[in-house]
Image (spheres, grey):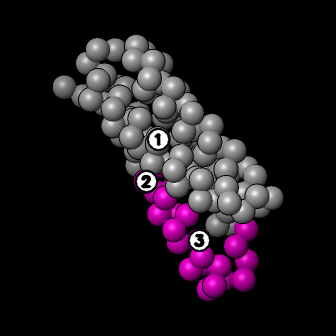
Amino acid sequence: METNTSKFDWAGILSASLCVVHCLLTPVLILLLSNKEWWHQVSYLFLAISFYAAFKATQNCTVNKIVVLIWLSFLILAVSILFEDTFTWLHELSYLASFGLVAGHILNIRYCKHC
């Protein structure tokens, strides 16, 4: 049976996965388009969706390691997106954060029966 929490976990998985695809397409689009500003704005949309999904998914979770994984991954993703123009290496770190969010949400789905 699917719970409300798992719906938010699935939303988080989808958002983080689309974020990875978005990041992978950035170099291609920079070459094709002269104005990439709108493309960077999409990152903020993923960040907002990720925050909401993380908040709702961890609201009733009792497995502290999963909660820490999801929120630490979100924090790293947020810092990466907000400061990647200043520190270009943060773009690569955002991949790790997105994968951490996906892993955290998958674990939360798996163990949400205990929450």
Q: How many angstroms separate mark 3 from mark 1 (CA)?
A: 20 Å
The residue located at (46%, 42%) in the rendering is: 100
Residue 60, given in percent of the width and then of the height, sits at 43, 15
Residue position marked by numbered label 2 in the rendering: 17
Tell me the mark number nearer the camera, choosing from 2 and 1: 1
Position above or below: 92 against 106: below
Would residue 53 be counted in the magenta stretch?
no
The numbered mark at residue 101 is 1
Which quadrant does the C terminus fall into? top left
Q: CA distance from mark 3 to mark 2?
A: 15 Å
The magenta segment is 16-37
- Residue hosting label 3: 26
**As rendered, which of 47 and 64 lies closer to the eye?**
64
Drawn side of residue 16 relative to residue 38, left or right = left
Residue furthest toward the left?
1
Q: Callout 1, which amino acid?
A: Leu
| Tag count | 3
Q: Locate residue 49, reporting x and y percent.
A: 54, 42
Direction from residue 39 to residue 100 in the image, left or right? left
- Where 29 sits versus 109, above or below? below
Q: Is residue 21 left or right of residue 75?
A: left
Give the vertical position of 60 relative to 37 (above or below): above
Mark 2 residue element: helix
Element on which disc 1 rests: helix
Label whose residue precedes the other's in the sequence (2 or 1): 2
Q: Position of residue 50 (x, y in %)?
A: 53, 41
Q: Residues within 10 Å of mark 1 (few under 14, many from 20)?
A: many
Any part of residue 104 in sight: yes
Can I make out residue 51 in this image? no
